[in-house]
Amino acid sequence: MTVEKRKLEHIEIISTQDVAHDYNYWDDIDIIQKSMPEVDYDEIDTSTTFLGRKLKLPILISSMTGGHPDTKKINENLARGAAESGIAMGVGSERAAIQNRAVGDSYSIVAEYDVPFRIANVGAPQLIRQKRDALTDSDIDYAVGLVKANALAVHFNFVQELSQPEGDRNSKGIKRRVGEISKKYKVIPKETGAGFSMQDALEFKQLGVAAIDVGGRSGTSFAAVESVRSRNREDSVKERIGRTFWNWGIPSPISLVLANVELPLIASGGVRTGLDVFRGIAMGATLGGLASTFLKAALQSDKEVSKLISQLETELKSAMLLTGCSKLSDVKKVQRIYRGRLIEWMNQI
Ligand SMILES: Cc1cc2nc3c(=O)[nH]c(=O)nc-3n(C[C@H](O)[C@H](O)[C@H](O)COP(=O)(O)O)c2cc1C
């Protein structure tokens, strides 16, 4: 199966089936509100600075796609929305374009829009030798240049790799390679649904990364996605591995606590609303990242993407008003009440 074809299958499955983790831990964060907040909604400032670039909203369209001609329109819809509203955007794994430059324009389309922060993307497993060769320095230069990126996301997705028949199994040597690449680029390690631990975060910091995107458990489960793909292919062995690891990982809010090593953090994995973005910022993040929620809008039109961003903004500002926050730095001080399964994690980390 080609990388291009696989990407289309992911989009199809994620946009039509329930492949989320069974529990969204963001719902376990309640916020103490103020009935007399003394804030004017119209004066609320949602702007922030991320790795030296100014954004109008603390929102990231998480890495998703590119690599097949059909994905160009999705990236264009997302980029137009991101440019219009001043938010950050990542593209999906660029391996497809590195292997076949003919599909490069499905990624480079985002560089045609004035997106204030663009993030390139490569997979950690591809940085080292697998059954095929590792990406070279010039492959990585190409991936960053293709989208005129401000930073490079390196995605970690071993749960997914292990659940897919064509998955990469070797992880030896990744640390050294992340360290090398971090000397040249602003590297953002990102999980894709399983979250990072404190040890991961401390090691990343030592390797010189610029920020960390926790990509925790609460939203899209790539073990689930691969399980569905295997079921469609009648591969019962892989289908069961995907089902077994469907709910694997560190919940997103917990990963934010663990990964707080004085680097900018991105809250992602199951972020659906402006209230979830608010919760992520309260838990220490600079940005909230959403993937599957944006996918559904981008499959419709650029208008739907803009509508979604404006909805997220309204929800974020509403939460800010209700807690007396006139700027994002105030959000870190709001009082939170943890409940449900989140408490079980909090009590044991
Ligand atoms: C259709 C789709 C494709 C994705 N492809 C990539 C990818 O190529 N690279 C990557 O780093 N993450 C990829 N992701 C993972 C997301 O960036 C994100 O970490 C994950 O989906 C959790 O966010 P969510 O719960 O908001 O969907 C993809 C997600 C979706 C929905």
Image (tube, helix red, strand yellow):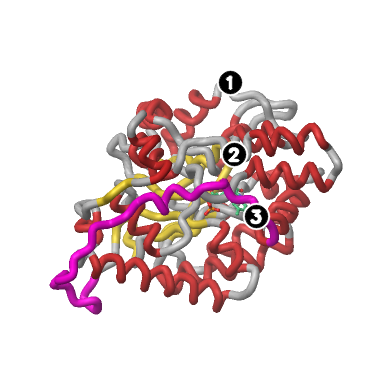
Residue 124 x %, y %: 57, 34
Quickly name the residue at label 1.
Answer: 172
Q: Which region shows up in magenta? A: 16-44
Residue 299 x %, y %: 64, 68
Quickly name the residue at label 2.
Answer: 123
Ligand 1: does it lie within 8 Å of the C-beta at label 2? Answer: yes
Q: What secondary structure is found at the residue carrying circle 3?
A: loop
Quickly name the residue at label 3.
Answer: 18
**Nearer the observer, 342 or 140:** 342
Q: Quadrant of residue 166?
A: top right
Q: Is 203 left, or right, of 153 in this rendering? A: left
Q: Is residue 52 magenta?
A: no
Amino acid carrying label 3: it is Asp
Q: CA distance from mark 3 to mark 2?
A: 25 Å
Q: Is 17 left, or right, of 275 in this rendering? A: right
Q: Main secondary structure of the magenta part?
A: loop
